[in-house]
Image (spheres, coloured by chain):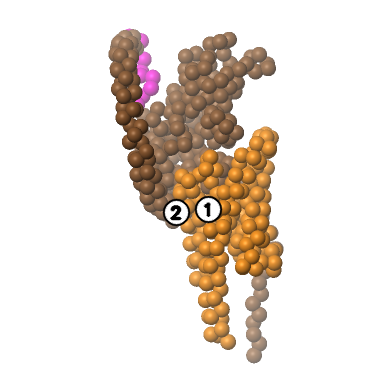
Amino acid sequence: MKRRTKRSIPTKYTLLAVTVLCVLVMFASFTLNLSGGPLNTVAGYVFVPMQNGINQVATWVINRADDVVSLQNVQQKNKELQAKVDELTQELNTIKLEQYELDNLRELMELDQKYPSYEKVAARVIGNDGGNWFSTFLIDKGEKDGIEKDMNVIAGSGLVGIVIDTGPNYAKVRSIIDDASNVSGMALSTSDRCIVNGNLVSMNEQRVIGFTDLKCDEDTVKTGEQIVTSHISDKYLEGILIGYVNTIERNSNNLTYSGTIIPAVDFQHLQEVLVIKDKKKTPAD
Amino acid sequence: MRRKLAVFLIITVCFLLQSTLFQMLSIASISPNLLIVVTSSFGFMRGRKEGMWIGFFSGLILDIFFGSVIGFYALIYAYIGYVNGFFRKRFFPDDIKLPLILIAASDFSYNILVYLFLFFLRGRFRIDYYLLNIMLPELVYTILVTIVLYFIILKINKKLEKIEKRRASKFV
């Protein structure tokens, strides 16, 4: 009796096939701007529930450990905060007066309110980039909760990043400190525009990100100036706080300024974020 | 089948730990690369083919969740698994020197490739900085984790091979 020999393809050909496949898929997803599609769905259902679980347990443990340490600090902090509350209440009163005045003026000019209150969804951070090169992370809300690509993500009052990919039950967020992130920003008081780019080196060394191409008059933008998202950005909603100017210097062309920004959000301890469900509408849409 | 399931479980657990727990335990915002340990050790324990496929799937998971294009990490990990497969003949389970060297070399070359393709090509030229502050710390941390993780993988592999041998001998 003749036995059928099982023929197997040599490994180097399989490697070649895998290489070709990967390169093709890379080109396809790069040029057509595709994401995983069905892969996202499968992976979402397999991995995300487990990530959720591990995260909850780990967060609980770390929180308990923190409780012990923080209790000592809390009383001290409480005092400081009370002083701050007094100070801020005073400030708030002044602002309320101004707001009242502003409202009146706006009514007169029949202007719509400039910053509508956006609809937001709270989400939990469930996983960070596995490597050490980039700062993307996963949140536990996805298409099923109405999350779409290009939605802005904030935490507290500051900008965190933007949704770059979604699965059924998770979404991938690129933070503004990611080395490949660029945001169009502007100085709050002068409305001078600049480009805010995430930078791995400066983030690691001093916990700051960079900005470039700020065109402004001499000495109008100083250290401590608030940088917010600009009105010309096509993906970021206008007026979200990015951070505060840390250093600023004139470029060698004598026209533009560049420097560093301290982000308004504490990216080290990011646990919960808010996703703004309103997307920026550009005339092209 | 049993082996495939076991390998899938190992990859899953390592991916989950890498993206959650070890991010919280990161030292100076550097965390170890567990999937490289899995890919590399299956490479030299089981040969080129298995190393390649395990690398491919480990990379694919990373691509789906954290990559900017699908296929990039999959390709790098597949090649790392494949190259590690060449050392199968020199591998002896009791000797930890070769695995440590291979895993260290894999992690280092992985980081060099990521730097070249995703940073160097975008005009980030400070290789000395990235070398000292990203690649080397990750290397050290990964090796520390390897010392534990490698023996777990080795034990699982031994058990699987035992079961497979017993089954094969039944059919003689």
The vertical placement of A206 against B27, above or below, is: above
Chain letter tied to brown: A
Where's residue A147, x and y in %? 41, 40
Q: On the image, which quarter does residue B172 sit in?
A: bottom right
Instruction: State yes or no: residue B54 in magenta.
Output: no
Query: In the shown orientation, is residue A232 left or right of residue A276?
Result: right
Image hue for chain B:
orange
Instruction: State yes or no: residue A115 in magenta.
Output: yes
What kind of element bears circle 2? helix
Which residue is rendered at x = 48% and y = 28% of the image?
A: A263
Q: Which residues are magenta?
A: A108-117
Query: In the shown orientation, is residue A93 left or right of residue A128?
Result: left
What kind of element bears circle 1? helix
Chain bearing tag 1 is B
Which residue is rendered at x = 69% and y = 64% of the image?
A: B87
Residue reaching furthest to the bottom: A1
Give the residue at mark 2.
A47
Front residue (pair A25, A69)? A69
The vertical placement of A200 against B53, above or below, is: above
Which residue is rendered at x = 66% and y = 63% of the image?
A: B85
Where's residue B46, x and y in %? 62, 67
Residue contact between numbered discs 1 and 2, judged by CB atoms under 8 Å: yes
C-alpha gap between disc 1 and disc 2:
9 Å
Chain bearing tag 2 is A
- What amino acid type is highlighted by mark number 2? Phe
Where's residue A184, x and y in %? 53, 25
The answer to whether one can see residue A230 in this image is no
Which residue is rendered at x = 48% and y = 25% of the image?
A: A243
- What amino acid type is highlighted by mark number 1? Ile
How packed mark 1 is, by other alpha carbons closer than 10 Å (few <14, some 14-19, many 20 or more), is: many
Image quadrant containing the N terminus of chain A: bottom right
